[in-house]
Image (tube, coloured by chain):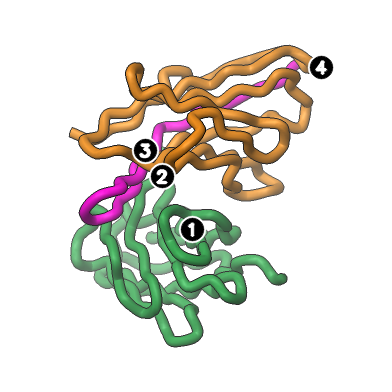
Amino acid sequence: AQSVTQPDIHITVSEGASLELRCNYSYGATPYLFWYVQSPGQGLQLLLKYFSGDTLVQGIKGFEAEFKRSQSSFNLRKPSVHWSDAAEYFCAVGSTSGTYKYIFGTGTRLKVLA
Amino acid sequence: KAGVTQTPRYLIKTRGQQVTLSCSPISGHRSVSWYQQTPGQGLQFLFEYFSETQRNKGNFPGRFSGRQFSNSRSEMNVSTLELGDSALYLCASSEAGGGAEYFGPGTRLTVT
């Protein structure tokens, strides 16, 4: 069955520390991969996406993600977290073959300590 | 450019009624997709429209339907509302599909 797993429901980091949010997927075809951020004032926003090509993807707000096919993972990283990064982050997977569908992970809520 | 707009922003309906939600994509975007967000089920894909055609549909009952007009604006309809339909309904637009790029603020539907 197709699925997306975000193992960490909550993560707390100190401002200035590095961040890695995990995302694992199970998908039959080569997937499209996405990371979104949702915060009360900003709504849901696309951070980055991977369709093909370079497996290291750069996104907005200083985020990047790496697609690792062998590990079925698409982890999101940021070298130095800012207090404004506190939000909920969602990983999503879409199909590249057949009927296009979307599956979202359950989300990781990030708390940033000053 | 104006962003994705959704109307109404808040809605209260009674069980058994029907509701229509509207989404206006960013100018020039031909793909509109819809999502349901609830605390229990999280974010779920409803359907995607591209150039007035439904391209994809998630695993929702037939009570959930939608359409897209020639100006790319889209509507979503839910008939025979159930309490479990209470949710935040989000729409998103993109130029050519292949993933939601820009989201609207959502419509908060409460079914009593």
Disc 1 and disc 4: Cα gap in Å? Answer: 32 Å
- Using the image as rendered, state which of residue A27 and residue B2 is in the foreground: A27
Type of amino acid at the residue the image marks with label 1: Leu
Disc 2 and disc 4: Cα gap in Å? Answer: 30 Å
Verify whether residue A107 appears in magenta.
yes
Query: With respect to residue B8, does A58 lie above or below?
Result: above
Residue ID at (65%, 31%): A63
Instruction: Look at chain A in the picture and name its colour.
Output: orange
Type of amino acid at the residue the image marks with label 4: Ala
Res. A104 in view:
yes
Q: Looking at the picture, how far across and down is residue A9, in whole percent?
A: 48, 21
What label does residue B40 carry, if any?
3
* Residue B105: quarter of image: bottom right
Disc 3 and disc 4: Cα gap in Å? Answer: 31 Å
Q: Contact, CB < 8 Å: mark 1 with mark 3?
A: no
The span picked out in magenta is A94-114
**Which residue position is annotated with label 1?**
B90
Q: Nearer the viewer, mark 3 or mark 4?
A: 4
Residue ID at (34%, 39%): A31
Verify whether residue A83 appears in magenta.
no
* Residue B26: quarter of image: bottom right
Type of amino acid at the residue the image marks with label 2: Leu
Disc 1 and disc 3: Cα gap in Å? Answer: 16 Å
Residue ID at (34%, 31%): A4
Residue ID at (47%, 39%): A50
Disc 2 and disc 1: Cα gap in Å? Answer: 9 Å
Q: How many other residues sit within 10 Å of disc 4, few (<14), some (14-19) or many (≥20)?
A: few
- Using the image as rendered, state which of residue A50 and residue B44 is in the foreground: A50
Say which label, 2 or 1, has the lower sequence index. Answer: 2
**Which residue position is annotated with label 2?**
B43
